[in-house]
Amino acid sequence: MVRTKAAELVVRCLENEDARFAFGIPGEENLDLMDAFHDTSVRFVLTRHEEAAAFMADVHGRLTGHAGVCLSTLGPGATNLVTGIADAFLDRAPLVALTAQEPLSLVHKESHQYVDIVRLLAPVTKWNARVEEPGAVPEILRKAFKIAQAEKPGSTHVELPVDVAEAATRARPIPWERTRRPSPDRPSLEKAAKLIAKARRPMILAGNGVIRGYASEALTRFAEQFHIPVATTPMGKGAVPWTSPMSVLTIGLQAYDYENLGFNKADLVLCVGYDLVEYDPVHWNPRATQTIVHIDFTPAEVSAYYVPEVEIVADIRESVDLLRERCGPRREPPWTKDLRASVLARLEIWREGRRGFAKPQTILKTLRNAMAADDLLLSDVGAHKIWVGRFFQTEKPNTVLTSNGLATMGIALPGGIAAKLTRPDRRVVTLSGDGGFLMMVHELETLKREKLATVNLVWRDGGLGSIRWKQTNKFGRTFGVDFGNPDLVRLAEAFGVRGYRVEKAGDLPSILDEALARDEPSVVDIPVDYSDNPFLVQEMGRIVARQ
């Protein structure tokens, strides 16, 4: 049997796992690993920062359900991966990180650039390990992918010391097949069906698990057949199309969510693919008295505000279909239409922006009209994320992606790169504030080098809009949130990327149409008027509470 370097075996294992990309930056301690990517099916994508590489692997994992791969050298390269790895951990995105390390002979003592990365990453990974024997590579890589992709998915990490990478072995990749998820137990289904039959005002809370489990169509059929309103978490946006008569859009954005009216009056809540990290149940079950049915791949997390009457722990799509067969006919209660009507009415409130500035709701309505239902929108974190959650009407699952569990700024631009590489047939739009965009602006070079036609919108307000808003609400003043910006159009052009500036709101439709039609990357600078931020939370909450 032919002997091969452990580094070469790692790449063969990646091929065995059907990994399409490896995002990262090379260094001295992973030279052998980098050389092993030559003439393989795994495409290495050089990024300009390791954090961006981890964000790219994160988004690839979300879109495919298959672990994205990111890599770095030791020390600062590995520590730069941490934020993206943590984001994948909390947002349940399958990701495998590969980091280099000093030789094994040095890891027991102080050494140049040595940091114990295995211990550092332990709190933000499902599992991680150091390869100390070249023959163990196939088992460790197989386990890393298996655990990363198992429910609930997340990040794993493998450290490859430089001397182990250079060592030879006769080991080979381990064959694998995707395992079938278990079927639901019948007594739990029967109990849930009885609870639904007794309920006068049931609600469905749909989370990201519905999307991961490809259960959107099944859940939509179920909700519409039995006339049960559905609210999605921000991560579950699109699990049920906004056009469904049962959709009451997104919950979990602010304390005065207009959907809360429905949950306050509901006598049964079916939580389908719901994860507590997406939206704490204290906000929709504050008295801890709600009757709950839990339908998910894994048992319910323990919380005093989340105590299910019954748990259906199995494949979500099969669970919903089998439950549908056991439920009898239901008449549509009058409150269902009233609830949806009040929600949609809030979306029709428009206000003119200041001269030269556009209102968030105007931008999002224009963007929705310009994009097809299956185009992809990557939203960064900031005030604009709340507006996207409220106003961007989503037709299909997994078409609006953001950072929710970790809620980290900077994910949109690199995430858009991964989205376009992963789904080259889709149009991709990223939406960032000027704060988040400047955190990752260096990835415009990656975007240009990879020849990827993404449209990158920057909502410019010269500061940290979300924190400015919260400071004003709490203290009546702001501090430490204002900054200057370069000329964003000229900055984009310095990277060889097409730049547009929206001088007035009326120009936005034609600019978006042109940018989306071009086969090249672009940046669109949009001065935004955030004066409606207080209205978004406070006034809309009061209006609905009066219904």
Image (tube, grey):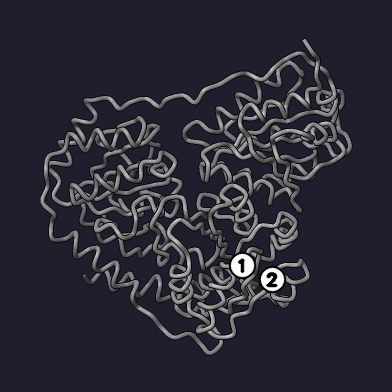
The residue closer to the viewer here, 519 or 493, is 519
Identity of the residue drawn at 54% across and 68% down: 466
Residue 417 locus on image (x, y percent): 64, 54
Q: Amino acid at mark 2?
A: Arg
Identity of the residue drawn at 23% across and 72% down: 546
Question: Where is 294 relative to 452, above or below?
Answer: above
Q: Please state if 210 lies on the left or on the right of 520 as rendered.
A: left
Label 2, on which residue? Answer: 498
Q: Please state if 342 lies on the left or on the right of 381 as rendered.
A: left
Q: Quadrant of the N terminus?
A: top right
In which quarter of the view is residue 337 placed? bottom left
In which quarter of the view is residue 460 placed? bottom right
Q: How many marks?
A: 2
Foreground: disc 2 or disc 1 = 1
- Name the N-terminal-most of marks 2 and 1: 2
Q: Quadrant of the C terminus?
A: bottom left
Residue 139 locus on image (x, y percent): 65, 19
Residue 353 locus on image (x, y percent): 48, 85
What is the secondary structure assignment of the residue under circle 2? strand
Q: Are marks 2 and 1 in contact (CB under 8 Å)?
A: yes
Q: CA distance from mark 2 to mark 1?
A: 10 Å
Looking at the rendered structure, which numbered label has been put on residue 518?
A: 1
Looking at the rendered structure, which numbered label has been put on residue 257?
A: none
What is the secondary structure assignment of the residue under circle 1? loop
Q: Is residue 90 visible?
A: no
**Neighbour tally class for label 2: few under 14, some 14-19, many 20 plus, Cα within 10 Å:** many
